Amino acid sequence: MLQTSAEYKTWIIHLKTRLRSLQMKAAVSVNAALLEFYWELGADIVDKQKNSTWGDGFLKQLSADLMAEFPEMKGFSKRNLEQIRRWYSFYAHDPEIAKQAVAQLSQIPWGHNIMIVAKCQSTQEALYYVENTIAHGWSRNVLTHQIESKLWEREGRSIANFAATLPKPQSDLAQQTLKDPYIFDFLTLDKDYNERDLERGLIAHITQFLLEMGAGFAYLGRQVALQVGDREFFLDLLFYHTHLHCYVVIELKTGDFEPEHAGKLNFYLKAVDEQLRRSGDQPTIGLLLCKQRDRLVAEWALSDVNKPIGISEYQITHDLPEEVRSSLPSIEQIESELS
C-alpha cells in the first residue's frame, strides 16, 4: 500500500533534510555520522511500525523513496533497512547499554556491525567484539574468525597463579592475555603427532598462530637454547609480549598435564629472567599448552610455584588418520606442480 499521508510525507522530508546535512560532513567522519544516522533511522523505523498503520509495504516504499532521492548513496536497499532495524533493536532494549553503544558502534564499519549482531547472542558479547575491533583494528575476516572461535568465552579462562606471583595491574592483564582452550584449527596433523610435530606446525603457520595467541605476541624463536651450568636446555617457543613488556615461554605437551611440567617450566622462567631479561622488562611468564588437564591437579601444581605460569588446553580440529595423511601431496610437490 503506497503511503500518501501527510505524516509520511512530512517524515520523508525530514529524512531528506537530515541526509543532506550528513552529506556535507567531512569525509573522515562519514562512517561515524552515517552510523549515527542509521541508529536514528532504526529508532524511527521501529517506532513507525509500532505506532502507525502503514502496512507491510512500508520498508519497501521507504527504500525506493530514499534510493530515488539519493541515488549516489548505498545502504538504502530494503534488506539493509531491515538490518538497520535489527541492529538498533539488538541494543536498544537496554537503555544504559544503548547509550554506551552508540559512540562505540559508530567507530567500526557497518559490515562489522552487521556481522557482530548476526553472530552474537547478547549485547555484552557484542560490545566485547566491538571494543576489541576498535582496539586491534580487526578486519571483517579476523572479526569473523574471533567470533566463530568463541574468543568471548575463552579469553582470561586459563588456570594461572598470576594473582600470587605478579603485582596488579600486571596480574590482571596477564590473565586476560591467556585463553582456554586455544584453537589450532589451521593445523593438519596425524593422530600420533608429538611435541616437535606440533611445534613445527605452529611455526609453519605463524600468522594464524599469532592471530590465535592474540595482540602483542612477538615471535622470537623455537628450541631456544639456554646454558645453565654445564647443561644446555631448550625452550619450545619463546615470545616477547609488547603490552605486558615481558618474555613469554610456551611449552607444548601432547598429553595430559602432569605436576612435574610446572616445575620444569618454573626452572625455564628462572633461566630466562637471569639470562635474557633486561632493565624495564617485567617478570617472564610461562604458558603450558597441553591436550588435557585436570583443573584441581593444575591448581595444586601451581599453588607453590613462585614464577607466573598459566596452563591451558589446546584443540586441533583437523586430525587426519596416517593413511590419509600419507596419501596427500607434500608442500614441495604442490610447489613443483605449480611451477
Image (cartoon, rainbow, N blue to C red):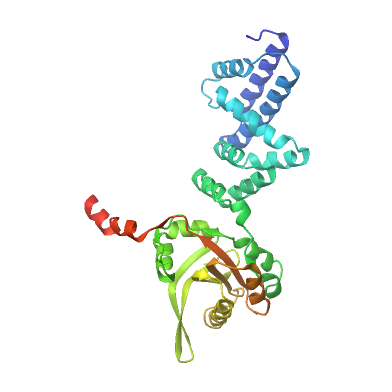
Question: 321 or 260: nearer the eye?
Answer: 321
Q: Is residue 43 left or right of residue 142?
A: right
The residue drawn where x is 50% and y is 64% is: 218
Question: 63 or 277: nearer the eye?
Answer: 63
In the rendered image, the residue lying farthest to the bottom is 230
Image coordinates for residue 167, horizontal then vertical, percent? 70, 72
- The number of numbered badges drawn on the structure is 0
Image coordinates for residue 96, horizontal then vertical, percent? 77, 41
Image coordinates for residue 187, horizontal then vertical, percent? 42, 58
Question: 313 or 29: nearer the eye?
Answer: 313
Query: Dividing the image into 4 quarters, which one contains the N terminus?
Result: top right
In the rendered image, the residue lying farthest to the right is 96
Q: Quadrant of residue 331?
A: bottom left
Q: Quadrant of residue 248?
A: bottom right
Q: Quadrant of residue 206?
A: bottom left
Is residue 229 in sight in this rendering? yes
Question: 290 or 171: nearer the eye?
Answer: 290
Is residue 339 in sight in this rendering? no
Image coordinates for residue 194, horizontal then vertical, percent? 42, 69
Using the image, determine if residue 337 lies above or below residue 74.
below
Q: Is residue 210 left or right of residue 26?
A: left
Using the image, determine if residue 128 lies above or below residue 320.
above
